Image (cartoon, rainbow, N blue to C red):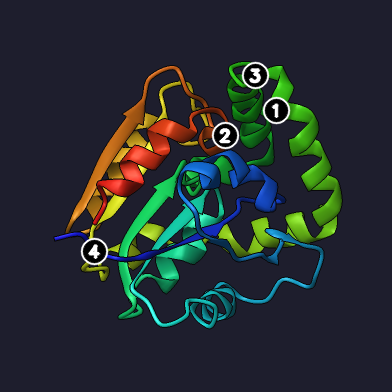
Amino acid sequence: MTVDVAHVFVPGLGLDGRSSARLRELLPGRVVLLPGMGLAASVPSLDVLAGRLVAELGEGPVVLIGHSQSCQVVAAAATDPRVAAVVLLGPTTDPRLRSVAWLAAQWLRTAVHEPLRTMPAVVAQWWRTGPRAMAALFRTAAPDRIDRRLAHVQVPVVVVRGTHDRLCPHDWAVRVATAAPRGRLVEIEGAAHMTPQTHPAEVAAVVGSSY
């Protein structure tokens, strides 16, 4: 039996709806922008951000699709009864990335594997959101324990990472996936961090198999 669900996309740090535009051509859905994630607004606590996301879910059921740092907000909202499944694309919540120097180094090691054609759009989205909101979101979200939150999520959780993604290394992706009672990991060969832009067909297939 086919389950009729809505897809709700939450962009990553500094990104907006453009980051999932190619994916949404294959997998129609709504984008929820939040402070630091497409909105240049004051960033509240992570639980308040999750509450704002929950308020946008509609009647349900929904599949929540987070990317990068928004995965923490998605995980915090995932216990809502309208959520049928969760897909976390490259969750950048590894405690090792809380060091700015280490984060910058891993970002550079990842960026060299991203197609150059995608960078102007990424920079444009960062410019729209603004460094103040992005920095505030990082300070708010980075310390939050996504693994502890996922331990209470009873719906399927799929963690997706590109094999060249240093912002979401393999060992961290395994830890996040296994934290959820019904979690699993899918790795996309040759991809880096911007999988919704660079590998939309593969991501769409994973989302379609998540519920």
Give percent across and percent down for residue 96: 50, 40
The reply to whether discs 1 and 2 touch (Cβ–Cβ < 8 Å) is yes
CB atoms of marks 4 and 1 within 8 Å: no
Q: Residue at x 35, y 67 (%)?
A: 149
Q: Image point 41% across, 82% down: which residue?
A: 59
- Check disc 2 and give the amino acid type: Met
The residue singled out by tag 4 in the image is: 3
Residue on which the image places disc 1 = 118
What is the CA distance from the residue labelled 3 to the residue labelled 4? Answer: 35 Å
Outermost residue to the front: 1
Task: Pinpoint residue 139: horizontal percent, then vertical percent.
Answer: 66, 60
Q: What residue type is labelled 4?
A: Val
Task: Give how far apart the Cα atoms at labels 4 and 1 are.
Answer: 33 Å
Alpha carbon distance from label 1 to label 3: 6 Å
Of badges 4 and 1, nearer the viewer stands: 4
How far across and how far down the image is residue 60, in percent? 37, 77
Tell me: residue 177, above or below residue 133.
Answer: above
Q: How many labels does the image show?
A: 4
**How far is mark 2 from mark 3, CA to CA?**
9 Å
> Three-letter amino acid code at disc 3?
Pro
Identify the residue position indicated by label 2 in the image: 194
Q: Is mark 4 on a helix, strand or loop?
A: loop
Q: Which of marks 4 and 2 is nearer the N terminus?
A: 4
Quadrant of the snapshot with the N terminus: bottom left
User: Which SS class for mark 3?
Assistant: loop
Residue denoted by label 3:
115
Left or right: 126, with 104 as reference point: right
Amino acid at dot 1: Thr
